[in-house]
Amino acid sequence: MKTHIIFMFFVLFSFCSCISDEESARQVNSAFQGNWSGTFSGGDNGSVAFTVKKDGNVAGEITLLPSNIKESLNGYVNFDGKFDMNTKSNYKFSGYLKDSKSNGVWTKNNLTGDFIFQKQ
């Protein structure tokens, strides 16, 4: 009987300690809000500038070098810093924003490379 009660408590606690997707979608004051910028290199090269809004939405642009072609960049940062950002031509940046820095790998179809971002 005692193990049954402990098991029930464990199950109940497990369900209560999880954060749902709905809860994370209600982010109202992102810890990562502000202006970020950085560079990416590899199969293509360029710079990145974006703003994380207080609701976690991301808006910015990439600038391809040496052509100086610009593309809009949009995405979202979760409450834990996990982000996904994309352009219309399929550049994808994913990873985790930390206090003031982030690095990781970007992709576009068969191209890949590294990126580094810093909070301004």
Image: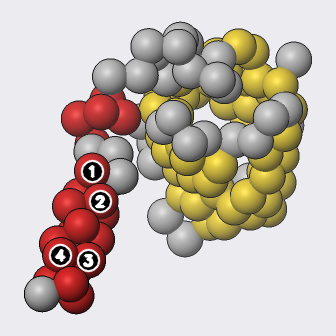
User: Alpha-carbon neighbours of circle 1 within 10 Å: few (<14), some, or many (≥20)?
Assistant: few
Q: How far apart, in angstroms, are the residues tagged by discs 2 and 1?
A: 5 Å
- Check if mark 3's residue and mark 4's residue have beta carbons within 8 Å: yes
* Residue where numbered disc 1 is placed: 16
Amino acid bearing label 3: Ile
Identify which residue is drawn at 56% across, 42% down.
80
Secondary element at tag 3: helix
Give the structural element (helix, strand or loop) at label 4: helix
Q: Amino acid at mark 2?
A: Phe
Sequence order check, earlier mark of 4 and 1: 4
Q: Which mark is residue 13?
A: 2
**Figure check: 111 above or below 56:** below
The location of residue 64, given as percent across then percent down, is: 73, 36
Q: CA distance from mark 4 to mark 1?
A: 17 Å
Residue hosting label 3: 6
Query: Residue 120's image quarter?
Result: top right
**Residue name at image x 34 percent, y 45 percent:** 19
Residue 36 placed where, x, y %? 77, 23
Disc 4 marks a residue whose amino acid type is Ile
Q: Residues within 10 Å of mark 3 (few under 14, many from 20)?
A: few
Residue drawn 27% across the image and 50% down it? 16
Residues marked 1 and 3 touching at CB (< 8 Å)? no
Label 1 SS: helix
